[in-house]
Image (cartoon, helix red, strand yellow):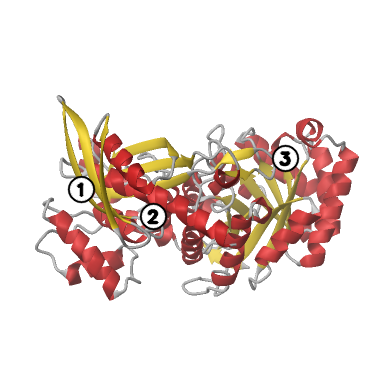
Amino acid sequence: MNSETDGSVKQKLIIFDTTLRDGEQSPGATLNIQEKLEIARQLSRLGVDVCEAGFPIASPGDFEAVRRIAQEIGTLTEGRKDGQPMTIAGLARAKEEDISRAFEAVKVAPRHRIHTFLATSDIHLKYKLKIDREECIEQTIKAVRYAKSLCDDVEFSPEDAGRSDPEFLTVVLAEAIKAGATTLNIPDTVGYTTPEEFGGLIKYLIEKTPGSDKVIWSTHCHNDLGLATANTLAGVTNGARQVEVTINGIGERAGNTSLEEVIMTVHTRPKNFAVYSDIDTTQITRTSRMVSAYTGMSVQPNKAIVGANAFAHEAGIHQDGMLKHHSTYEIMRPEMVGLAASSLVLGKHSGRHALRARLIELGYNNLSEEELNKAFNRFKRIADKKKAITDADLEAIITDEFYQPKEIWKLNDIHVSCGDHVKATATVTLTGPDGVEITDAAHGTGPVDAVYKAINRIVNEPNTLTEFLVQAVTEGIDAIGEVTVRIQPQEKEGDGYVTNPQTGTQMARTYSGHGASTDIIVASGRAYMSALNKMLSERAERMAK
């Protein structure tokens, strides 16, 4: 598929998003099924070509999430430039049981893919897999051939390719092609290479691998040295036509290549790259904020493209230049990535029509009348405390109002008494799963500690608070505060733990919660209840199976 841009023929760059697989492997970024479905739906709106929905063999929950994404999201075509639904991919080790499980999860999608992998670096072969090169080749052939017997679209990745012997790679990859692979993905698994090295590796493999013209070449770069995007673009320059990326660059350790950085680089510098994509760039900011809210992983303010400061100007010289012409200090317009540039001010005198219009501009155009009324009531309560409501305030309101887990326990009221010479005391009222209101109180070392102890007295679900993060959404003394918490159940084994399919070790389940309010104590209570409800909802789902 080609596109004429700037007088030159450009090839389609396939965008393979692994936010729901590699991204979710970030510590503390666990998502429930409903959250995964919402993110997958937004990835479809964004125009992603391939969605790696998960690692089906990892757990029954992961299998079910991939299956439902294939079933419910794998058929959507609305708003997509190519008119085709996303390809739904499942990851599998080079083992028949993994590959079978992945196929069972994705097969219901009209366009589905099995992505299988096997390490090829000597360090992985010797210390992790404990096999030699010949066994590596044999396992690769067997895995790819079996995957091909189940579906036509098969991707193979030689894990740790960045530290593998290039000549050996050509042998492995040639066998993968003969066995039926249609995409060959070259991972810089530990973020070790530099752009010159990685670009050179892609070029070498394409030139030296027999049958290389029969497959799509792909990149998968990690950011351990901060070079993931640069390495990926070097790969594209040297012939790669698929890039594996995540929203906000989340992923193992220092993260993966950031989707938004690759897309906007290609979009902003079209003469430098012989490729185009079908990504709707105006959906980037909304997607970024959704992933941040659901995973509880905040985007650093100076993050390229989607950071809070990406289009902010404070220095006097910069402000003077911007007033004269935006291009003096901006190489792209905020509207290109879906960041509203409107100066419409919303306050306590604004009505429903003004709120609805602004929410539609922000991308929330599917709210029902009931949902709009809930958002409007919340908006009015905040507007009584603030002079003006900003876009960031509205994003926080919508996230907190609608993107929370099913309420098993509902937080009704919080009352706190505290001071420098008074022991902090909190009284909370919750509505339980049986609809009965329960009120209890507790002392704490501070107001938040007291609130959490009072909630624990009622809910009685032992857990460990592993992270507590507070940040202001907007500027000023009346700013909305966002609180993100992470908790882990206190079980020693079983329900509170999940097995890592790669290492076989037990990992504690982690649940994140998010809350927003002009009252930081209320926001803290909402965040904690969100995390508790996630934990309880997932436990109920597991017990129901």
Q: Residues within 10 Å of mark 1 (few under 14, many from 20)?
A: few
Can I make out residue 9 in this image? no
* Mark 3 secondary-structure assignment: helix
Closer to the chain start, of discs 3 and 2, is: 3
Q: 317 or 141: nearer the eye? A: 141
- Residue 214 sits in quarter: bottom right
Residue at the spot 18% in from the left edge and 55% down from the top edge: 389
Closer to the chain start, of discs 1 and 2, is: 2
What is the three-letter code of the residue carrying label 2? Thr
What is the three-letter code of the residue carrying label 1? Leu
Q: Residues within 10 Å of mark 2 (few under 14, many from 20)?
A: many
Q: Which mark is residue 161?
A: 3
x and y percentages locating residue 98 in the rendered image: 74, 54
Can I make out residue 173 in this image? yes
Q: As drawn, is 57 to the left or to the right of 95? A: left
Q: Which residue is mark 2?
A: 285
Q: Spatial distance from mark 1 to mark 2, Cα to Cα? A: 24 Å
- Residue 216 sits in quarter: bottom right
Q: 252 or 454: nearer the eye? A: 454
Closer to the chain start, of discs 3 and 1, is: 3
* Mark 2 secondary-structure assignment: helix
Q: As drawn, is 196 to the left or to the right of 45? A: right
What is the three-letter code of the residue carrying label 3? Ala
x and y percentages locating residue 340 in the rendered image: 29, 58
Residue at the spot 76% in from the left edge and 30% down from the top edge: 123
* Mark 1 secondary-structure assignment: helix
Q: Nearer the viewer, mark 3 or mark 1?
A: 3
Q: Residue furthest top?
A: 421
Residue at the spot 50% in from the left edge and 55% down from the top edge: 538
Q: Which residue is mark 1?
A: 323
